[in-house]
Amino acid sequence: MPKISGSRGPPGIPIKYAPLPEWFIISGMWRTATYEALGRGDLRAVKLNNRTLIDVEHGLAWLASLPAAEITTGRRAIRSKCGFRPRGGIMTAFNTPAGGARDGDKPPALL
């Protein structure tokens, strides 16, 4: 549970509700993602006068329940989708077997 630091109150007291700017810092979520989660009911909030306060404990529990991220490198994904091979020079339709060119075909003249 995050603790209050700075001039907002005595240090070491757990935060139960946090205003949106502090929730963004605590959670790492952006404004749009926070409002989307509130709209879906994933986050709980209360209104105090004109301020929206996020239930921090519930919000952090929801974040902890999300599935782990599956990280892949962009290079491998590109290679598997379009047949890109970074080594071996420039690939053209005339030097790739899948390009449909036959031995002896010449590339078109440049305009």
Image (cartoon, rainbow, N blue to C red):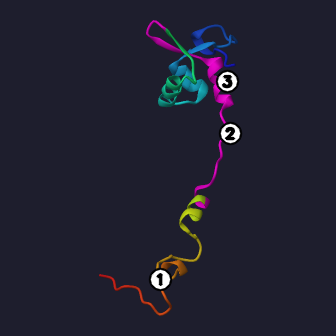
Residue under pointer 2: 68
Q: Is residue 35 above or below residue 94?
A: above
The disc labelled 1 sits on which kind of residue?
Phe
**N-terminal label among 2 and 3:** 3
Kindly identify the residue that appears in the image at 52 percent across and 23 percent down. Answer: 38
Q: CA distance from mark 1 to mark 3?
A: 57 Å
Residue in front for this viewpoint, 83 or 30: 83
Q: Amino acid at mark 3?
A: Ala
Amino acid type, label 2:
Ala
Q: Label 3 neighbourhood size at 10 Å, few (<14), some (14-19), many (20+)? A: few
Label of residue 94 in the image: 1
| Segment tinted magenta in the rendering | 48-76
Tell me, yes or no, whether the two marked residues, 2 and 1, touch with CB atoms within 8 Å.
no
Q: Is residue 64 left or right of residue 38?
A: right
Magenta-colored stretch includes residue 102: no
**Which x, y percent locates residue 13?**
68, 10
Name the disc covering residue 84, or none.
Answer: none
Counting residues from the start of the chain, the first of labels 1 and 3 encountered is 3
Label drawn at residue 61? 3
**Residue drawn 51% across the image and 30% down it:** 33
Q: Is residue 1 above or below residue 68?
A: above
Residue 43, placed above or below residue 46: below
Q: Residue furthest left?
A: 111
Disc 1 crowd, CA 10 A, few/some/many (<14, 14-19, 20+): some
Residue drawn at (49%, 88%), measured in percent from left and top? 102
Q: Residue at x 58, y 30 (%)?
A: 28
Q: What percent of the width, then of the height, locates residue 7?
A: 58, 11
